[in-house]
Amino acid sequence: MLQPIEGMDRIGEENAFAVLARATQLATQGRDIVNLGIGQPDFPTPPHIVEAAVKALRDGHHGYTPATGILPLREAVSADLHRRHGVEVSPDNVVVVPGGKVTMFFAILMFGRPGADILYPDPGFPIYRSMIEFTGARPVPVPLREETGFGATADDVLSRLTPATRLVIVNSPGNPCGGVMPKAEVAKLAAGLAQRPDVAILSDEIYSCMTYDGEAHESLLKYPEIRDQLIMLDGWSKTYAMTGWRLGYAVWPDQLVGHARKLCVNAHSCVNAPAQWAGKAALEGPQDAVAEMLAAFDARRKAVVAGLNALPHVTCATPKGAFYAFPNISGTGWKAKPLASALLEEAGVATIGGPDFGIHGEGYIRISYANSLENIERALGRIGDFLGERD
Ligand code: PLP
């Protein structure tokens, strides 16, 4: 009998992939499914980025690269961080990885162990809790509340620190609720965490380019007092519609960057070379496509929020970031997961039940509005018909 470590029984999954598989299966059977489940831009990667990858292949970039990424890409990341956040970051602190998720994995592996507390947002990206449990650390959920627009407050986080806390995970703009931490809260959080130099911070800023209604994203990188504690995760997946390229990066503090490099060497050697050249072209080329995608997401966001609030017994706070809405469905009499499942099986609309994002997700479903306005309107019509029939 094989005996994998006990942690393997605790490691979880992302239900969005199971919903995607079921939606695809139903579609293959001839059902007309509108997919508001999966969290990826529905746009193609901008052509100049694709061309850069093709050129890299033609130019012979077929071999291994340095483990943390080619220097021109890490320099491009430094320049981009300076452009967007006004901060100085050495390319030596940038570690390029196959998707933002890998940074999460590395950071939680580095700090998770029995006896350690790790704080994470709930509802939140399911992989945080999955990995924390895998390591045997104690997962400490920081509840995100509708009343505060689903942005964590500094007090929500700081009040949960214990002497055992080793890592704090924050995610703004956030998945699955679309909440954004206002600048004042980010500043207060940085000041509070600076008092605990023994606590590492993983700031998941993968949606940093996606904020609306004049709400600006405030990066924790801007706070020198926590630079030695901060792992800042960002990447190309959402901003440049590159989820399938598997390309992401993080800025690691001096003390940890060597560990991160060794994990790269042990895990994957390096990210595939053409994707790295494409990533450089994305950061250095025209940003028009990013602005166009953001404008499209904004129009869809408004349509989704208005449409959801017009449904019987549903209310939806206006999300300020990412491309998700997190409507409150508790008034419908349905539990979230059965509702998400019935919407898929009976109404042909894929969504994700809030509990798939944590213990504070009951009463909500996640709607990804990374789909065309036309499909969004069709989905809203179907959800309305479905809920109306059950009234
Ligand atoms: N962080 C959050 C909050 C996400 O929602 C996602 C993807 O859905 C990721 C990280 C992972 O991004 P990547 O596709 O670059 O691994």
Image: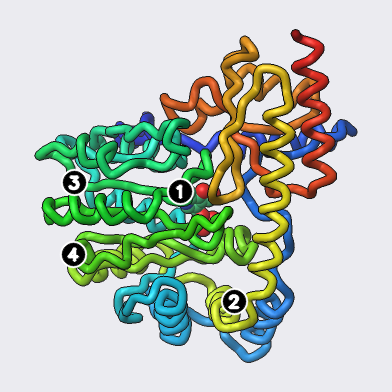
Indicate which disc, 3 or 4, sits on the residue closer to the N terminus.
3
Does dot 1 land on a helix, a strand or a loop?
Answer: loop
For the residues labelled 4 and 1, the Cα–Cα distance comes to 22 Å
What's the residue at 32%, 49% (across, down)?
Answer: 185
Residue lying at the far right of the rendered structure: 30
Q: Amino acid at mark 2?
A: Ala
Colour option used: rainbow
Quadrant in which the N terminus appears: top left
Q: Is mark 4 within 8 Å of ligand 1?
A: no
Select label 2 or label 4 by which is in front: 4
Does dot 2 land on a helix, a strand or a loop?
Answer: helix
Select label 3 or label 1 by which is in front: 1
Q: Which residue is mark 3?
A: 166
For the residues labelled 2 and 4, the Cα–Cα distance comes to 31 Å
What's the residue at 60%, 43% (across, down)?
Answer: 324
Q: Amino acid at mark 1?
A: Val
Q: Is mark 3 within 8 Å of ligand 1?
A: no
Q: Which residue is mark 4?
A: 225
Determine which of the numbered discs, if any, sits on residue 180 in the image.
1
**CB of mark 2 within 8 Å of CB of mark 1?**
no
Q: Residues within 10 Å of mark 3 (few under 14, many from 20)?
A: many
Task: Please give left or right for residue 69 compared with residue 106 in the image.
Answer: right
